[in-house]
Amino acid sequence: MAKTRELRPAYGFDDVALVPGNVTCDPADVEIGLRIGDLTFSIPILAAAMDAIVDPAFAIRFGKLGGLAVMNLEGVQTRYDRPAELLTQVAESTPDQATALLQRIYAEPIKPKLVAERIAEIKAADVPVAVSVTPLRAGDLGPVAVEAGASVLFVQSTVTTARYISKSQSQLSFASFCKSTPIPVVVGNCVGYDTSMELLESGIAGLLVGVGPGAACTSREVLGIGVPQVTATLECQAARDDYFDKTGRYVVLITDGGMRTGGDIAKAVASGADAVMLGSPFAQAAEAPGRGHNWGMATPHAALPRGTRVKVGVRGTLEQILFGPTSLTDGTQNYIGALRMSMGMCGAQTIRDMHRAQIVLAPSIKTEGKMYQLAGMR
């Protein structure tokens, strides 16, 4: 008789808590900078490559604030001369019209000249330029981006592996691609040790962690695929650390999606992330082009959308969301202040110190003693 397979537990941000350190430190003194290749950033937060979030103006503003915003090279910015008009249409469409409208909008071909123009616009503001492509288009759009002056190239898909079997499509060799690309290449997304190790060995500069946790993503519902982000990040951290021990080459880990509060970001870092990538929280910024809406890169898929347009509202400026000041008490603004405070309480003076913070299973962490807060939510 065959043995029944055992299910291993997996944990998300709401399932765990961080344990205060034996020593605490001043939040103002903690070091939270990020390094990708030869590029340095003062904050470890990236804005996701979503059309409702990152256009050239947003990327410039985000860069001036010390972070890195990633522009989608397969979105409306590179398909239309006046993308703002299309974004307005999406924002004003009804919920049952939105996906069909997006499918029509994204049927327009990508124009290489617009790729170059958008990158040049960001580059002219003297901030690093990060752009994203899918593995299928990396071979043709990657060189265009490099020639136009991109600083970092993200190669992203819902699930990314170093090995891909297909009778109709040729596989992108990440090893060859990284070797021939003169700028840092960040690849994702993945959630496990073995996949991470194979991608790390291909020469990438950064690894994105997360399948389906984003507020606008429906991959977990449509495909049934995903691993909660704390477990996924811990798995990928183990691969990253083992790879570093073997080679001496450190590859940054970026937890992508599923974070709403400053506490979520701190837990991601404690799980092993060097940085986080946020989507819908930045769609709430006054500077975001989606006008209080967001949708994922897979939402416009012509045959099987794996995302939906969500209304997130406009809740503040980009600076408020990152640095405050804020009067909101739910942890959705002043992310940097919250991260610094959490690191200080855990006694972590650097991001890599925070990787050693103690994490406990705590399914009641958000409800214990919170009767009046919970009553106010009903």
Image (cartoon, rainbow, N blue to C red):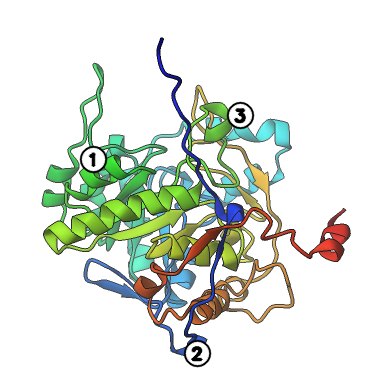
Q: Looking at this view, is 51 or 284 the one in front?
A: 284
Whichever of callouts 2 and 1 sits on the residue coming sooner in the sequence is 2
Whichever of callouts 3 and 1 sits on the residue coming sooner in the sequence is 3
Alpha carbons under labels 3 and 2: distance apart: 51 Å
Q: Residue at the spot x=30%, y=74% of the render?
A: 40
Q: Which residue is mark 3?
A: 100
Whichever of callouts 3 and 2 sits on the residue coming sooner in the sequence is 2
What element does badge 1 sit on?
helix
Q: Residue at the spot x=52%, y=74% of the render?
A: 339
Q: Which residue is mark 2?
A: 26
Quarter of image, res 44: bottom left
Q: Looking at this view, is 96 or 29 the one in front?
A: 29
Q: Is residue 54 left or right of residue 167?
A: right
Q: Looking at this view, is 344 or 305 the one in front?
A: 344
Quarter of image, res 167: top left
Quarter of image, res 157: top left
Q: Which residue is mark 1?
A: 140
Residue flagged by tag 1: what amino acid is it?
Asp
Mark 3 or 2: in front is 2
Against 256, is 307 above or below?
Answer: above
Residue 205, can we see it? no
Alpha carbons under labels 3 and 1: distance apart: 27 Å
Residue flagged by tag 2: what amino acid is it?
Asp
Q: Where is residue 72 shown, x and y percent of the image?
A: 41, 49
Q: Where is residue 268 shown, x and y percent of the image?
A: 47, 60
| Crowd rating for badge 3 (residues with CA inside 10 Å; few <14, some 14–19, many 20+) | some
What element does badge 2 sit on?
loop
Mark 2 or 1: in front is 2
What element does badge 3 sit on?
helix
